C-alpha cells in the first residue's frame, strides 16, 4: 500500500506519539483489517505495528494511494475490526 504523507497528517499522528513507520508497519501487519466508517470515503483500519503496538488508523483512499488522516494506539479490548 502506498501511504501519502503531508504536514497535517504527520502532525496529527505525532500528537498521538506515533511516527510514519508505526502507521506503515500497522498497514503491512498480518492482523491488519479495515472496515468502512460512518463517514463517506473514510475507512478505519487496525493492525499491530513493528513493535507490537495495536494502532487504529483513520484513512481515505485516493487515486494516488491511502491518506492516513490520523492514527493512534489502542488497547486490544477497544478493537473494532470484525
Image: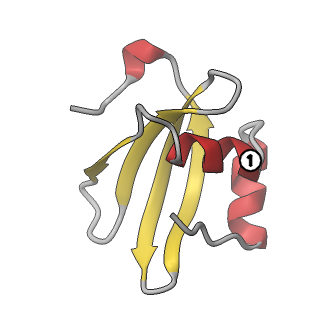
The answer to which quarter of the image holds residue 2 is bottom right
Element marked by disc 1? helix
Q: Is residue 12 above or below residue 33?
A: below
39 relative to 56 in the view: left or right: left
47 relative to 81 in the view: left or right: right
Residue under the point 51% across and 63% down: 1
Q: In the current view of this chain or complex, which residue is farthest to the front?
A: 30
Q: In the current view of this chain or complex, which residue is farthest to the bottom?
A: 63
Number of other residues with Cα within 10 Å of mark 1, as a class: few under 14, some 14 to 19, many 20 or more: few
The answer to which quarter of the image holds residue 41 is bottom left
Residue 4 picture location, percent across and down:
63, 72
Residue under the point 77% across and 46% down: 19
Q: Total of numbered circles in the picture?
A: 1
Residue 24 picture location, percent across and down:
63, 50
Give the residue at mark 1.
Answer: 21
5 relative to 26 in the view: left or right: right
Amino acid at each position: 500500500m502506498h501511504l501519502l504523507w503531508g504536514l497535517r497528517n504527520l502532525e496529527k499522528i505525532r500528537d498521538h506519539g506515533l511516527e510514519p513507520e508505526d502507521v506503515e508497519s500497522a498497514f503491512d501487519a498480518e492482523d491488519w483489517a479495515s472496515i468502512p466508517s460512518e463517514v463517506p470515503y473514510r475507512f478505519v483500519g487496525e493492525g499491530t505495528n513493528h513493535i507490537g503496538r495495536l494502532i487504529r488508523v483513520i484513512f481515505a483512499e485516493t487515486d494516488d494511494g491511502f491518506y492516513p488522516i490520523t492514527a493512534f494506539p489502542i488497547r486490544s479490548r477497544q478493537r473494532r475490526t470484525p
